[in-house]
Image (cartoon, grey):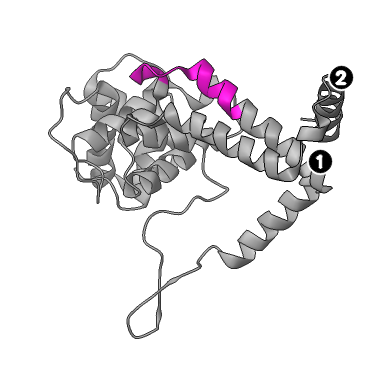
């Protein structure tokens, strides 16, 4: 997005219509608040969960996009009127937020001694589906549903949507969570059966208990799962990654 070009376009737009005299900072802030209120109306009667997927709740997603654009346009005009360099302001604000809210390296006990952070940690050496699994577990702890946790965790990854949205690892994670197989997640009574991909994870966990060395090779582990379950599918398609990520962190309840 070219911010200066957009601001120039907005200046010309207002000049051609002789609106410039109305665009004082006070008026722009008031107009901005109106647009934010109109944006809020789209979410007024949605539940928390519905607001995360408004299209499924019947909300006017195109209208939401228009209101978001209106808010942005007024912010651009306000910054232009006040001579605020938005790129510099945002960069400085992000840096200030990082100093104000540093990533904690450890929690503190009541006695003041450091304790390891609860929950898994994403590591660079992990595969994409291991990273998504770990982030999804973190999001479960924040109150997201398994479906939404997996979706949000995948958005962090730079891979193409086809990779992030691959159904096999997603169905394995979601079904394991829904059936109470992820430590610390209080699942409601499941409304659907355990998926085959989740069942492969549980079979793999049993195999790893018998033969821990299988954890050193995804290929050998998947071959062992295939042999025990009789599945004909050649590739593990990310299912083993979900299994290994959960098992490594001690989060898989069998």
Looking at the rendered image, the quarter that the C terminus falls into is top left
Nearer-N-terminus badge (1/2): 2
Q: Does residue 133 appear left or right of residue 77 in this picture?
A: left
Q: Secondary structure at mark 1?
A: helix
Q: Secondary structure at mark 2?
A: helix
For the question of whether residue 239 can be seen, the reply is no
Pointer 1 residue: 80
Q: Does residue 81 appear left or right of residue 99 in this picture?
A: right
Q: Does residue 40 appear left or right of residue 203 in this picture?
A: right
Residue in front for this viewpoint, 18 or 40 = 18
Residue in front for this viewpoint, 95 or 149 = 95
Image coordinates of residue 189 in percent, x first then y, are 12, 33
Residue in front for this viewpoint, 1 or 234 = 1
Residue at coordinates 50% horizontally, 30% vertically from top-left?
39
Q: Name above or below for residue 160 compared with residue 21.
A: above
Pointer 2 residue: 16
How many marks do you count on the picture? 2
Residue at coordinates 30% horizontally, 33% vertically from top-left?
47
Closer mark to the observer between disc 1 and disc 2: 2
């Amino acid at each position: 997005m070219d911010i200066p070009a957009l601001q120039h376009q907005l200046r010309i737009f207002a000049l051609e219509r002789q609106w410039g005299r109305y665009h004082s900072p006070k008026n722009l802030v008031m107009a901005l608040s109106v647009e934010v209120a109109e944006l809020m109306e789209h979410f007024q009667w949605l539940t928390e969960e519905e607001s995360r997927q408004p299209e499924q709740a019947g909300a006017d997603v195109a209208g939401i996009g228009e209101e978001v654009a209106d808010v942005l346009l007024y912010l651009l005009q306000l910054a232009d009127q006040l001579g605020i360099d938005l790129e510099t302001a945002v960069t400085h604000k992000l840096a200030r937020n990082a100093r104000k809210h540093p990533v904690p390296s450890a929690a503190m006990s009541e006695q003041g001694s450091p304790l390891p952070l609860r929950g898994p940690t994403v590591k660079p050496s992990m595969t994409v589906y291991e990273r998504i699994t770990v982030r999804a577990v973190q999001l479960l702890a924040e109150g997201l549903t398994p479906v939404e946790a997996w979706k949000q965790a995948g958005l962090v990854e730079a891979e193409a949507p086809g990779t992030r949205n691959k159904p096999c690892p997603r169905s394995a994670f979601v079904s394991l969570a829904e059936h109470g197989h992820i430590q610390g997640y209080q699942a409601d009574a499941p409304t659907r059966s355990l998926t085959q991909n989740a069942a492969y994870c549980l079979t793999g966990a049993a195999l790893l208990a018998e033969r821990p060395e299988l954890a050193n090779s995804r290929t050998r582990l998947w071959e062992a799962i295939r042999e025990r379950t009789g599945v004909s599918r050649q590739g593990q398609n990310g299912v083993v990654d979900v299994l290994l990520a959960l098992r490594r962190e001690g989060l898989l309840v069998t």
